Image: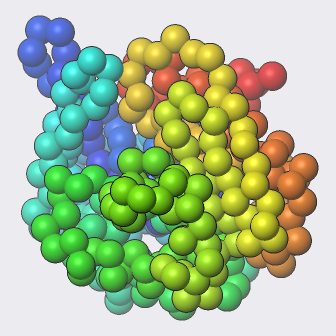
Amino acid sequence: MILCCGEALIDMVQAENGSFMPHCGGAVFNTAIALGRLEASVGMLTGLSNDMFGAQLRQALQASNVTTDYVVTANRPTTLAFVQLVDGQARYHFFDENSAGRMLQQTDMPVLSDTISALYFSGISLVFEPCADSYLALLQQNHQQYLIMLDPNIRPNFIVDRAHYCNRLEKMFALADIIKVSDEDLHWLIPETNLSLEEKAQKLIDKKLVDKGAKLIIVTRGTQDTLCLSHHGDIIMTPTLPAKVIDTIGAGDSFNAGFLAKLSELDAVDKAEFANITPETLQQALHYATKTAAITVSRAGANPPNRAEIA
């Protein structure tokens, strides 16, 4: 099982008439849903409210075959993210104070079972405390047993203390097997203008930012080829696929799900197996990830495809 650890929230999406409609969302939630639709074994670890929105989120997870055994229920509100689309790009305004997801404590974390093979971390759950520190502690306690994938999915507008946030990320980078970033994420993390994107990616893999060295760095670049660097020195470029873009909500989340789903299908999601992964297997997983993302951006909202839609 791939356990997705992080936020599940309600996206209040603005309609043409100016009203807002509630849709299930959150970076980690979207990835879990996509994995479920791709028929990967998947669960979610998050804090959910016992209010009506929490019930909506739980039902959506279960409808996509996502195990909710690791969900922590609390008598707190659900996080709301008001979404406006500007030229097809999503802009977010979060209401997250004292929410069930944000207030998740280290003592709330469930004991993980041997049926889990990988942990996935992402999103605003890595920004806000106390949940960010709780997910860091979970990673630190379990990184030797499970394959770890991390996508910081950086939203600069929500980061009040850059140094504190980056310090937490560096601790997580140091223990991750797979780090996925967008080109925007990478430029924010490493703002030096004299370095190329590939050189910045190398900094994440050569112990300058990662004390122990990640096994894989994936850099998505919008409509340009995806860049992948392995600790073996392999450099893989994977072309994106043409798509009629409706909006980009959930594109990166679907990419991550596609990548993990294909690794799982190829029996490469195990930590020991992944350490010896071949470039050919990586290329298969990256291609599947780009196909998954291409279908998602061709639809309104975070609506990832099911397995049958990916030829």
Q: Residue at x 61, y 87 (%)?
A: 212
The relative height of residue 146 versus residue 9 in the rendered view (above or below) is below
Instruction: Find residue 4 and report its horizontal and vertical position in percent.
Output: 53, 61
Quarter of the image where the N terminus is located: bottom right
Q: Residue at x 54, y 71 (%)?
A: 204
The relative height of residue 73 versus residue 185 in the rendered view (above or below) is below
Residue 300 located left or right of residue 68: left
Instruction: Find residue 100 and report its horizontal and vertical position in percent.
Output: 24, 64
Snapshot quadrant of residue 98: bottom left
In the image, 299 versus 80, the foreground residue is 299
Quarter of the image where the C terminus is located: top right
Q: Is residue 110 in view?
A: no
Residue 127 located left or right of residue 150: left
The relative height of residue 182 versus residue 174 in the rendered view (above or below) is above
In the image, 98 versus 301, the foreground residue is 301
In the image, 144 versus 287, the foreground residue is 287
Instruction: Find residue 199 and report its horizontal and vertical position in percent.
Output: 56, 61
Snapshot quadrant of residue 64: top right
